Image (cartoon, grey):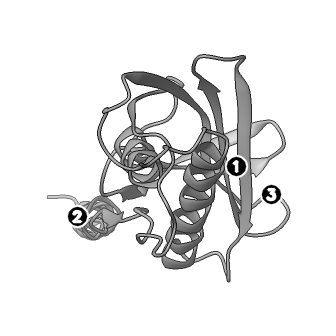
Amino acid sequence: MNPRRGPRRSAACALCALSFAFAGCIGSSPPAAPVRWFDATPDAVAGRDPAVPVDVRVEAAAHVGREFLVRTAPRELVVDAQNGWLVDPRSIVAAAVERACGGGSSSGAVLRIEIERFELDVAVAPRVHVRVVVRGDGPSRVVEQVVDAADRTPESMAAAMAIAVARVAEDVASKLAPVETR
């Protein structure tokens, strides 16, 4: 037997064991954080006479979904896979507008709303941006709300979103003719 071969083999085995241990450390990452869900449903507005009850139909741009959309630059949106809306934005906007307009469709009027923006904006300051196009009997019109958030936390952004959605719903309802009561 060659006396030099023993230490070389021991060093090779040690190096191999060390590389397996190192690979095990790299390969075993901690589990991903669970997805957090936030409610952007606005609180009911008390003391306001409802406008015209309408049948509200809401559509959204293809990129608007339950995931948080975060604007990080003027031409960049990032999908936040760790935070999402508890309810789809279409349902949030539809419920808020129906509530602001007085509920169900007793007048036969159909109001079509398309959500163009339902995003968190951190490009300059923490804020939310909601932009919808409203189509009804008359010409289409854009309703837009930008609301500053207290900070960049998902909780603050969700609270600001609820305010923005409520303001959009109130703006849509205020432009409709009030119901005449006799």
Q: Which mark is residue 163?
A: none
Q: Are marks 3 and 1 in contact (CB under 8 Å)?
A: yes
Q: Which mark is residue 13?
A: 2
Q: Is residue 130 left or right of residue 28?
A: right
Q: Amino acid at mark 1?
A: Arg
> Height in image: 91 above or below 141?
below
Q: Residue sitting at 43 percent across and 53 percent down?
A: 96
Q: Is residue 121 left or right of residue 163?
A: right
Viewer-side label of 3, 2: 3
Q: Residue sitting at 40 percent across and 62 percent down?
A: 41
| Residue 12 showing in the rendered view | no
Q: Which residue is mark 3?
A: 123
Closer-to-camera residue (128/70): 128
Q: Is residue 175 left or right of residue 38?
A: right
Residue 49, given in percent of the width and then of the height, sits at: 50, 61
Q: Distance of mark 1 from mark 2, alpha carbons?
A: 52 Å
> Which type of secondary structure does the marked residue at label 3 adopt?
loop
Q: Residues within 10 Å of mark 2 (few under 14, many from 20)?
A: few
Residue 42, given in percent of the width and then of the height, sits at: 45, 66
> Which type of secondary structure does the marked residue at label 2 adopt?
helix
- The quarter of the picture where residue 26 lies is bottom left
Q: Amino acid at mark 2?
A: Cys
Q: Which mark is residue 71?
A: 1
- First of labels 3, 2 by sequence position: 2
Residue 90, given in percent of the width and then of the height, sits at: 40, 38
